[in-house]
Image (cartoon, rainbow, N blue to C red):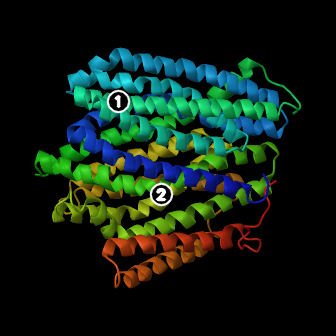
Amino acid sequence: MAKNGFIKGAMLLIIFNLVGKIIGAVYRIPLANIVGSVGMGKYQLAFPLYCLILTISTSGIPVAISKLVAEYNSKNRFKDSKRLLRISILILTVISAIGMIVVIFGAKFIAKIQGNASNYICYYGIAPAILFVGVLSAFRGYFQGNLLMFPTAFSGFIEQVFKMVCGLYLAKRLIVYGTEFAVLGALIGISISELFAFIFLLFCYIFYSRKHNHMQEISMLSYRHLTKNLINISVPVTLGGLITPVTSMIDSLLVVNILMYRGFSNSNATMLLGIQSGVVEPLINLPVVIAISLSTVLLPNLSSLLAKNSKTEIKNLIERAYQICLSIAITCAICFVIFGGQILSFLYGRSFDPNELGIAIKLLFLGSLNIIFLSLVQVTASVLQGMNKQKYPVKSLLIGCSIKIVLDVVLLLIQPINIMGAVISGGVCYLVVFMLNYNMVKKLTGATLSNSFFYVSIQACFVCMFAYFSNLLFKMVFSEMIAMFIAGILAVLVFATTFYVFFMGKSGEYGFENKIN
C-alpha cells in the first residue's frame, strides 16, 4: 500500500459510515411521524430475527474473503481470489436464501409469539433484503481484500439513501391501509436499498475485472481447498459475532427482572432499561463505528503484509491503527463527558422528564470510558484475525461477556447502583476483552500502545478544551444549542488539522511517516 493509503482508506470508510449513520437517524424522524409510536414498535419487532440471520450469513464469510484475497493477491494468485469470490457468492446465496425462506414461512408464527399476530406481513417486506445483503457482502469482502474501500463505502451510502427515499415514500402511500402496511412499505424500502447496493457492487466488479484482466492468472489451490480455507476462518468469526447479541438478550432479561426484585415497578425497570440500552448505548456506539471502519481496512492490509512476512511493517501498521483509534475514541469520550448533558437535552429534552434526563446524563458520563475500550476491542480483534488467530478474539469475548453477566447480577442488586451496574459491567467486559487481545497482539507482533497514549491524549484534551471554551464564548451571543453546534463544527476542523499534522503530514512524529509497502 502506498504511503498513507491505510489512513486514506480508513478515512473514506469513516466519512461514509458516519454520513450513513446520520441519514439513518434523520430517516427515523419522518418515519415516526408517518407510522406513529405504535408503528415504530412494529418496525422494531421485525429486526431481532433479521439481525440474527444477517449475523449468521454475513459476519464471518466477508471477513474471510477480505483476508484471503489480500493474502492471495500479495502472491500474485489473482485466479485464486476470483475463485474464492465465486465460492463465497454460492455459499452466501444458499445460506441467505434459506434465511429468507425461514422468515417468509415463519412470519405468522414469529409474529404470534411476539404478541403481535397482525405484524406478520411486515416480515414479507424485509425478507428479500436477507438475500441481497448476503450476496453483496461477498463483493464487499472481495473489494476490501483488494484494498479498495470506495465500493464498500459508497454502497453503504446507497443503502441509506434508498432506504430513506423508498421507505418513506411507500410508508406514506400505504398508511391509508393501516399501520402494518405502512411499516411493510418502510421495510420494503430496506429490501430495495439492498438491491440497488448489490447492483452498484456488481457493476464495480465488472469494471474492475475488465480493467485488471491483464494481470497474470496464477492458481495454486483447488475449489475444495479454497472452500476449506474460507470455512476455517469464517466459522470462528461468525461464532464471535453471535456472542454479543446473545449476551445483550440475556442482559435485557436480567436487568428488568433484577430491578423488579429490588423493588422497582415493572414500568420503572423497563424505563431504566430503555434509557440505558435505547438512549445511552446508541450514543456510546456511534464513535465505535469509526473503529469498525478502521478495522475493516486494517484486516486485509495485515493479511497482505503477513503473506510477505514483513514484520517491521506489520508492527508499524498496528501501532498506527492504535494511534488513530485512540485519537478519535479519547476525543469522543471527553466530549461526551463535557457536552453529554447538552447533547441529551437537545435530543430528548422534550421526551424525558427531568428525572429521566438526569439518569441518562449520569449513565452517559459513566459510559463514556467504554468508548475507548470498545474501540480498541474492535481494532485488536481485527489484528488477531489478520494474524491467523481468529479463534482467540472469540475466546476473549466469551470470557468478557461471561464476566459481564456475573457483574450484572451482583451490581444490579446493589440499591445505590441499580441500572448503572449494567454500564459498569459493560465497561469491565470491554476492558477484559481488550487486555486479553492486546497481550496476544503484543506477543505476536511487539506492537504496543506505549508510544501512542500520551501524545493522542494531549491532542484529544486540546481539541475538547477548544470546544469547551468556544462553546462558552458563543453562548454569550447565541442560544445554548446554536453555540454548541458552532463550537462542535470548529472542534471538528481543529481535530482534522491536528490529525493531519500528527498522522499524515510529511514531518509527522511518532513514526507516522513510515511507508507501508
Left or right: residue 263 versus residue 281 is left
Q: Which residue is mark 1?
A: 185
Residue 27 at x, y = what percent? Answer: 38, 46
Q: Residues within 10 Å of mark 1 (few under 14, many from 20)?
A: many
- SS for callout 2: helix
Q: Secondary structure at mark 1?
A: helix
Is 446 in front, or is 234?
234
Q: Are marks 2 and 1 in contact (CB under 8 Å)?
A: no
Disc 2 marks a residue whose amino acid type is: Pro
Q: Is residue 53 visible?
A: yes
Q: Position of residue 436 (x, y in %)?
A: 54, 52
User: Depth check: 32 or 383 in front?
Assistant: 32
Residue for point 58% across, 30% down? 198
Q: Residue at horizontal 45%, vertical 71%?
A: 488
The residues bearing labels 2 and 1 have C-alpha atoms spaced at a distance of 30 Å
Mark found first going from the N terminus, 2 or 1: 1
Identify the image quadrant of residue 411.
bottom left
Q: Find residue 29 and report its horizontal and vertical position in percent.
A: 32, 48
Q: Quadrant of residue 144?
A: top right
Residue at 37% x, 52% y: name it.
Answer: 282
Label disc, if present, on residue 483 of the rendered structure: none
All told, the count of numbered labels is 2
| Image side of residue 475 versus residue 510, left or right | left
Examine the rendered structure and indicate whether residue 433 appears above or below residue 246: below
Depicted 511 relative to depicted 229: above or below: below
The residue lying at 44 percent from left, 75 percent from top is 487
Residue tagged 2: 287
